[in-house]
Amino acid sequence: LHSAVTRIQVQRPGFNYTFAHICILNNDKTCIVDDIVHVLEELKAARSSNRTNFAITYPITHLKDGREVYNGHQLGGVTVHSKDRVKSAEAIQLTYYLQAINSLNDMVAEKWESIFCDTVELFQKSNRKVKMYPFTSSSLKEDFQKTSRVSERYLITSLVLVVTLAILCCSMQDCVRSKPWLGLLGLLTVTLATLTAAGIINLTGGKYNSTFLGIPFVMLGHGLYGTFEMLSSWRKTREDQHVKERTAAVFADSMLSFSLTTAMYLVTFGIGASPFTNIEAARIFCCNSCIAIFFNYLYVLSFYGSSLVFTGYIENNYQHSIFCRKVPKPEVLQEKPAWYRFLLTARFSEDTDDSEETNTYESHLLVWFLKRYYCDWITNTYVKPFVVLFYLVYISFALMGYLQVSEGSDLSNIVATATRTIEYTTAQQKYFSNYSPVIGFYIYESIEYWNTSVQEDVLEYTKGFVRISWFESYLNYLRKLNVSTGLPKKNFTDMLRNSFLKTPQFAHFSEDIIFSKKYNNEVDVVASRMFLVAKTMETRREELYDLLETLRKLSLTSKVKFIVFNPSFVYMDRYASSVGAPLQNSCISALFLLFFSAFLVADSLINVWLTLTVASVEFGVIGFMTLWKVELDCISVLCLIYGINYTIDNCAPLLSTFVLGKEFTRTKWVKNALEVHGVAILQSYLCYIVGLIPLAAVPSNLTRTLFRCLFLIALVTFFHCFAILPVILTFLPPSKKKRKEKKNPENREEIECVEMVDMDSTRVVDQITTV
């Protein structure tokens, strides 16, 4: 396999590049390859010459030239005899290092990586007993973007399901008052806003990434609720009013809360899109979401508002809600077939008594269910204790999960499942998790290496590690020569330069030491490095992070000034400091906005309840997503930011109606709030959940995290809207009776009664107006 890889050729005009042309070179101008390759070559030579005394030790072995090399990250699944002699190994890892010094070299290296993967796969076909997992510098990027391709048909299925359910949610048996087109047009409004945002990002040179898959679901939760809320407000208007008056009442009733929740989305996602967020994918996601939400607000005001007016005129003219055909009077329908009567069933105002006129929309299934059954059931005295008990269970499990929250730094969590990244990281975790990556231990100042106390300090700092160290090797070298390690400075340095580093088996340590000549020609070691490897268990990432923090604290307090480094530390540091930043900033901005808006709303108690509800929902979502094996990574943090807004979106109108209600009992106002806003919440929730279900089948870890977080947000918010808040609000203070407004005895009511008789004197209408 190694020979096949080194023979790979990249054809360019006039020249064919091989590994030897683009590899990284060492001091003797040969390609750097893994030491395990030299071990295997020596093992092969020993077998061909029938030598049986050749042994490989683990995790440090000796080459033919006497060099000590570390093979813990190159041999995996190792079984050893006594004295660390390797009996067998289940896995070998080979790494090839390529240059990227200019654009041509970078292009050739990228092409070489592509051919490398094809070569390994071809080699796999001819050697089926050996499993091979290639991985290159571009594999993660390719596998990250692959999620979008594998999600396409699932997203189409999701769209079809949401369209179907949105139309059904807006339909009712009455063919005049049914509004199926508004369900479709509401979804079209959300789609137009999402496409507009995508177009703007594309035109401004923005980069697409797979986290954008969450944006349609962000828009679905916010946009559809706004359109359903407007439709619910339309159902509360009087049918004898003009369409303009009904539309004005709809906008006055629903657009205030929709405007405030839109502002909350813009603030929280705006903070996430600001320079305070260090993760570029999170920043781009938040920026795109802000643009989509802003245009969705404009489209709801204009496009969907116009659609509502249009369907209002259709209803006012007694035209069919789908076919726009004039619905005949009942006496004409009696002469038609049964299927015709079924399609054109409608209630005319002439057939409706005054007492029934306000209840024409109650034939809608969800309105009927909430008003007739659910509102009375959830506020029943015998149901409340069980709901409170259920909430305590919910808090208990959420707390159990919250105490186990872990920050996810596993890159395989953001890629599709059947990819090279998953296969490679799985194999690496299985076979190469016994030891940590090689950690560089850099002493960046001149210290008294010849001093025995300093020697003891350095060895103490690196105690417990597997060490690949010039310092330890040099001290052992002196002991073998029966020379004291506490030599004078000049003797210590001269023997290091002229004897130790000239020995072939220690010559490679010359790259680990920097010498400097002083003004008196005295040579001093100004800096040096050693390499450490720690023994780790399966919880490798957590151990690595703890190890990094321990070494850092030690570097700040030790006598010897040193730093530790491994390329993986860069990602760990950045991720640890950045993963929670968007969520933290968004929570702070949301709290500030809620605090300052308390002085603008009619009652500051609304904001108090809203803050407690958001805290309860976010606490539950974080706890349950941990129990569902979802880590706190970039995707889950973005979902939690959305969860703040989704909760406010659904709970704010409900709480506002309850808090502002007066003169009746708390139970009465809870029922009223559910009747007014419950249908819109239920409709948007059903559409949202149906849209999420296909996402669970996408073969990608990214979409799996997305589905679990969004599903939990929707479920927990729904649980609060329809169970927790309706029960808790009925018995927690303040009392509604105490908040009754005292009537001023000077105020009086004037009642004007107007009797109107139509032209043919067949009907009398009493219009009563209270002034």
Image: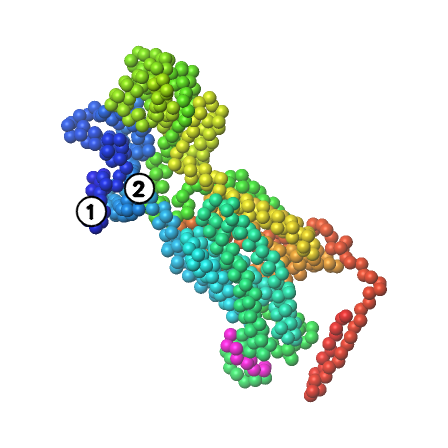
Q: Residue at x 42, y 49 (%)?
A: 702
Q: Do the residues labelled 1 and 2 touch (CB within 8 Å)?
A: no
Under circle 1, the secondary element is: strand
Q: Give the range drawn in magenta.
A: 322-330
Residue in front for this viewpoint, 609 or 672: 609
Badge 2 density bin: few <14, some 14–19, many ≥20, Cα 10 Å:
few
Q: Residue at x 31, y 46 (%)?
A: 103
Q: In which quarter of the image is residue 99?
A: top left
Identify residue type, mark 1. Answer: Phe
Q: Which residue is drawn at 77% across and 70% down?
A: 771
Question: In the displayed structure, would residue 646 be above or below residue 91?
Answer: below
List the single residue furthest toward the right: 746
Q: How is the image coloured?
A: rainbow
Residue 122, magenta (yes or no) = no
Q: Please indicate whether residue 206 sits to the left or right of residue 399 in the image.
A: left
Read off the residue under disc 1.
15
List the single residue furthest toward the left: 49
Image location (x, y in percent) of residue 546: 46, 32
Q: Can residue 362 be seen in this view?
A: no
Residue in front for this viewpoint, 479 or 662: 479
Q: Quadrant of residue 213?
A: bottom left
Q: Please indicate whether residue 169 sits to the left or right of residue 115 in the image.
A: right
Q: Residue 101 carries which label?
A: 2
Q: Which residue is drawn at 33% across and 31% down?
A: 72
Image location (x, y in percent) of residue 743: 81, 61
